[in-house]
Image: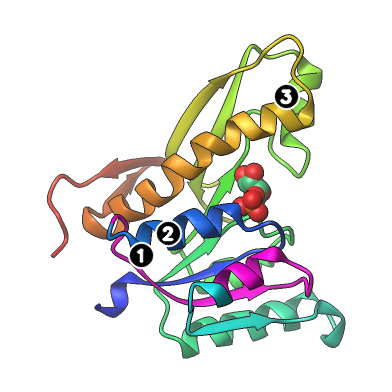
């Protein structure tokens, strides 16, 4: 597979989005090459999921081993470059990336967020949406820039909010949509490509190769 389809995934937790991406790759539904998975947490289930799927390099980097965030991010970036990864997929990665990291990979980092951006950015999106009393929420796949949860939007999916929803019940309904749109968006990115007009992502119609 050519290197324009080489992917690094960064994940801190349960790794269900990583798993659906790896499953889609294995089933032939997502034509990318996941070469590297990085986690900042030793206990991340994402590490076990990556190892079980046979990802060539599965790396745990302990932030405490680095003097500061910039040095930690530089070590991650070097690893990503060493593996020739074109795309960096954040899948529940709970650290804010430094501006240095984001600038090193312009337009090449994507994230999934459990709300319809620009509503409810930040680490407590599901709780914030419930507390606000919205009747619909959902998820957003977006490019990462230097504004937290602020980059151009690649895809969104909406779910209804029910009166008796808890954080967990709403998050579970949102994750069903995350698991549908994240691999599908990755596939579209590598198969079709896109351009950015203003801050709007315009998908190309033709496959890139
Ligand atoms: C997802 O809800 C995603 O939107 C957010 O973090 C969560 C990660 O879930 N960024 P998982 O680890 O992929 O299960």
In the image, 186 versus 66, the foreground residue is: 186
**For residue 159, which quarter of the picture?**
top right
In this rendering, which labeled residue sits more in front, label 1 or label 3? 1
Above or below, 157 relative to 67? above
Q: Residue at x 48, y 54 (%)?
A: 20
The residue at the point 31 percent across, 54 percent down is 187
Packing grade of label 3 (10 A; few <14, some 14-19, many >=20) is many
Q: Nearer the viewer, mark 3 or mark 2?
A: 2
- The span shown in magenta is 29-50
- Identify the mark nearer the N-term, 1 or 3: 1
Residue 84 vertical position relative to residue 31 in the rendered view, above or below: below
Q: Quadrant of the N terminus?
A: bottom left
Which label number is shown at residue 129? Answer: 3
Asked if the magenta segment contains residue 30, the reply would be yes
Confirm or deny contact between disc 3 and disc 2 (CB under 8 A).
no
Q: Nearer the viewer, residue 14 or 118?
A: 14
Which of the marked residues, 3 or 2, is nearer the chain's N terminus? Answer: 2
Q: Within 10 Å of the Cα at label 1, are there few (<14), some (14-19), or many (20+) other Cα atoms?
A: some
Instruction: Assess whether mark 1 and mark 2 are in contact (beta carbons under 8 angstroms).
Output: yes
CA gap, disc 2 and disc 1: 5 Å
User: Which numbered dot is residue 26?
Assistant: 1
Quadrant of the image occupied by residue 139 = top right
Task: Tell me: is circle 3 under 8 Å from ligand 1.
Answer: no
Instruction: Please tell me in which quadrant of the rendered image residue 207 appears.
Output: bottom left
163 left or right of 151 in image:
right
Q: Is residue 75 visible?
A: yes
Residue behind mark 2:
23
């Amino acid at each position: 597979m050519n290197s324009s389809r080489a992917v690094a995934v960064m994940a801190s937790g349960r790794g269900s989005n990583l798993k659906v991406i790896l499953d889609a790759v294995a089933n032939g539904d997502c034509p990318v090459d996941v070469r590297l998975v990085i986690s900042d947490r030793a206990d991340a289930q994402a590490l076990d999921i990556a190892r079980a799927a046979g990802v060539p390099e599965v790396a745990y980097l302990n932030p405490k081993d680095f003097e500061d965030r910039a040095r930690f991010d530089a070590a991650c970036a070097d690893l990503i470059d060493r593996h020739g990864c074109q795309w960096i997929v954040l899948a529940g990665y709970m650290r804010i990336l430094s501006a240095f990291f984001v600038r090193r990979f312009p337009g090449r980092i994507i994230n999934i967020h459990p709300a319809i951006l620009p509503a409810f950015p930040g680490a407590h999106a599901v709780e914030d949406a419930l507390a606000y009393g919205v009747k619909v929420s959902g998820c957003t796949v977006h490019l990462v820039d230097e504004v937290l949860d602020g980059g151009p939007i690649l895809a969104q999916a909406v779910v209804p909010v029910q009166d008796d929803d808890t954080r967990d019940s709403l998050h579970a309904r949102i994750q069903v949509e995350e698991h549908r749109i994240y691999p599908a968006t990755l596939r579209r990115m590598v198969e079709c490509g896109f351009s950015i007009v203003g801050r709007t992502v315009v998908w190309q119609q033709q496959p890139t190769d």
